[in-house]
Every structure is written in structure tokens, then in C-alpha cells.
Amino acid sequence: MTVTAQMDQAAQAGPQGEDGGQPRPLVFARVQTALQQSSLTAIAQHMFSLMLRNMSSDGFVFADPLAGQPSDPVTGQPFAPGTFSAPGCIIAAPSFPADLGTVDQDYVFNWTRDAAITAVEIAAANMPTRPGEGVQPLIDYVNFAQTCQNNSGSVTIGHATYTVEGQPQPRSEQSDGPALQTLAILQAFPQLDAPTQATATSVINTNINYLLGTDPQSAGVPVYQGKTYNLWEEELGFSFFARSVQLKCFQQLTANTYGIPVPPATAGAITFLQNALAGHWNDQDQFYQSILPVPTDRGPYDPNIDIVLSSTYGAVPVTDTKLLATAAQIHQQWSDSSIAYPINADDQGRTPPIGPLLGRYPGDTYDGDLQDPAVAGHPWALCTANFALLYYALANTITQTQKVPLDNLSASFFGQVGVDAQTTPAAAAAKLQSFGDQMLNALVFHSDHLELSEQFDKDTGFEKSVRDLTWSYASFLAAVRAKTGQSVLG
């Protein structure tokens, strides 16, 4: 129990035991960290260690919370997992209902997408190793990826989640997963030993053959041209995010120098996806639409933060002024519109100001508990960190090119940070850096001793939903790397 949690428990009991001296249960959402004054680099080093806690090895394993259950409690499908995780499994979070009573979601699974995003940060850290040997966590990651592929059976390679043992868990199909996994392995490739490089080549070949192969849902259409469940696993359609990461995957495969074969159909896929992404632009509302056709079974779905994530993980350049026009509306809707989060107004009044914290999309109602639906969504750590990364990456590009991509589309984005046509490139980069810092400082301030959950309460700023979300840490690390230009380990 932390000191902060002890104090919180005592406060709930009332002064001098007014409730009879019986301690009340600890409330995870009420724990909050004071604003840190140490550097974001030092904080990132600590968060790197927190992220690695969610990856298993041959000496550090996770017990499967579903072990012994005859069927998956969510889907009702037959379920016969083993007991412990295999090396290389990266769980989305260590939270499940029996462990954390404030959620009814089990995140003790390996999401192909989340694991790939985490592996990118492990590769970027340049972890020390002995001469001639590979980085063991990356070796484990590649071998576990192949285990999942081999166990796919009747499901496709685009399956979203696997158990900690590497067995497919009944869920959605997401074609962004194989693309992100390929990108992660390409980045990790030089840090693998020779046997694992051979395995990595095989995993990549399987992923590429899947993406270029026939979509099982649309006979005769390649997977990359077909529909998929979107980033948030809610809508089936043509996903801007999936298309952007698929495009980057094909581009980097084409440029690889590791001898990994590039199928002839790759060039045509690149051209198709470039044209398809352009088709998501809504000229009337001036933003990229996250999924087509536009969903009609829910509230407003755009502007959606997955457009910003498409620049972090995909092929959309940060200088794309249509991306920046979309980002401006995303920022505005969570900070000064009718649906803004109250905590952001509080944070702007602090000295110095921090934030804002950002959510996923305007009609979001998910809060980690499906049995008690929320009426409004909450900000997410990964959404906020990725927007900060956009600021940092754009600042870096402006510094390198000495050009500010300011036009009629991006004017609103730059206006939010105080940049106009008279602002010099150096001053524009400095302003973008400062606004990125404010957003990361909000994550630090609202964290639980630097541990990051999935969400923050929109009214109080306290953490909520599943605890220790791996993707939250990975997104914070990526943002700090963009800010500093250095690996998290220096």
C-alpha cells in the first residue's frame, strides 16, 4: 500500500474514526501523483521499466486468469487455456474483474496491435546485450508472434487477440495488427540473433501474404483493400488507421535491406492505399473521416483521435495540412467546446498550466465497465501522449526544413499554439515543444506515482478503467523519444 493510498483510506474513514473506526476499501481512482519537476527523460526511463512488467519471459510469467474455465465468459466460446504465459507475451494490462473491481474487462491478453507498439519501444531503447547476442525480449517477442500465427487455425492472421499461451481468443479481426507487427519486427531485426532473424522473416512473409491475399469476407478482394474492424474494435469498415499502417508496412518492406522478399503486388498495394487515404477527406467538415462508410449506429465518431495515431504509427506525414486541420478540431473538442472535459479547465488554471487531456472521439461512452455504461467518455493517456508526439515530431520537421507548413487548412492548428505567418520556424518549433510538454506534464500529474491507467476521470482527473495499460507507457515513451531524439536508455 502506498503512503498516498493510506492517507486516502484514512480520509474516507472520517476524522478521528467518525465511522466507527472501520477502514473503508481503497479506491484506485482516488490516488493521484503530485506534479513532477524532474525531467521527462528520467520519467520515461522509469515508465520503460513499468512497461516491461507487462511482458513475460522464461523467468517472469503471468497466470492466466481464465485457466480452468470451460468457456470464455465474454463470448461464451469453448476455452481451454493453460496456466502460465509463454515468453514474449505482452499483455495489454494486468487488469481483470477479479483483480480490479472497478472494471468488468479482462485485459490479460496479447493484442497483436498493442504488442507491436510495445515492441517498437523495446527496439528503440537499444537495450544492452552481450557481443554477438540478440536482445532477449525482442527474440521472445518474435518467437511468440510465430506461436500465435501457428495456433491461428481456423481464424485468420488478422486475429486481434491471443491468450497468454498464444492461443487465439474469440474476438474481432483487425488487419492493422499484421502490418504493425511487421513494422515492429523490421525495426527490431538488427537486434535479433541469426536463428530469430530467420523466424522473423517467416513471420513477416506470413503477414504480407495475408495482407496481399484474398479477404475471406470479400471474395476476390485483397485484404488491404477490404473492410476491417477499426482501431477501437467497434466498427467494421474501411479504416483510415489500418490503411495508413498498411501503407507504411508495404513502404518499409520495399525499402528493407535484410533480404526479406518483396512480392510484386506490393507496389500496386502502395498506390492503392495512397489513393484510398485521400478518399477519407471530408471537404465540407474539413477533417479526415476515420472509417467509411460513416457509422450510423452510434453518436458522433469524428473527428477521431485515430487520425493522429495514423501519423504516429502509419504513413501520414506530420506536415500533411489535412491531418493538422483534423488535429485542430480534435484538440478543440476536448478543450473549449460544449463537450470539453471539466478537468482540462482546471488544469489550464494551474501554475504552470498543463494539458489538455484528450479522448478518442466525441460520442465515446466506454469507461472500462460495460455493466454500468457511462453517459460520456473520458480522456485517455495514449490519446494525449500521441497528440504531444505530433507536436514534437512537427517541431523537429520544422527545425530540419526551416519551413512551417502553414496554409488555410492548418491555420487553425497553428493558431492554437500561437503560430501565424509572422512566426519564425525557430519560434514555431519552440511553441510546439512547449505545448507538447504541457500535455505530458498532465499525464505525469494525474498518474498514480507515474503508473498509467487507460483513462482519467473527465471531472476529477483521477485514474480510472484498467490499470497499468501497456500502450499508455509505450505512447509516453514514443513522445519523449520524439522530443529528445534519444533512446529511453540514453
Image: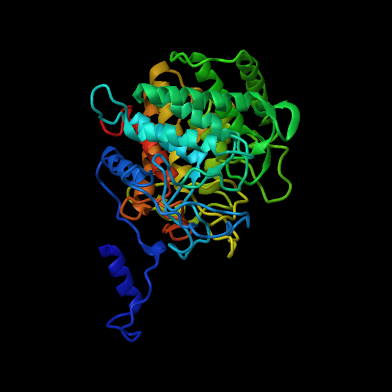
- 134, above or below 368, in the image: above
- 145, above or below 59, in the image: above
Colour scheme shown: rainbow
Which residue is at the front of the view, 261 or 49? 261
Residue 109, position as x, y percentages in the image: 49, 48
The C terminus sits in image quarter: top left
Q: In this view, which residue lies farthest toward the bottom?
A: 20
Which residue is at the front of the view, 315 or 470? 470
Res 434 seen here: no
The image quadrant that residue 230 belongs to is top right
The image quadrant that residue 224 belongs to is top right
Which residue is at the front of the view, 157 or 336? 157
Q: Is residue 237 left or right of residue 22?
A: right
The image quadrant that residue 139 belongs to is top left
Q: Is residue 153 left or right of residue 398?
A: right
Question: How many marks overall?
Answer: 0
- 38, above or below 244, in the image: below
Residue 163, position as x, y percentages in the image: 50, 47
Which residue is at the front of the view, 260 or 104? 260
Residue 355, position as x, y percentages in the image: 42, 46
**Residue at coordinates 59% horizontally, 46% vertically from top-left?**
361
**Residue at coordinates 50% horizontally, 57% vertically from top-left?**
66
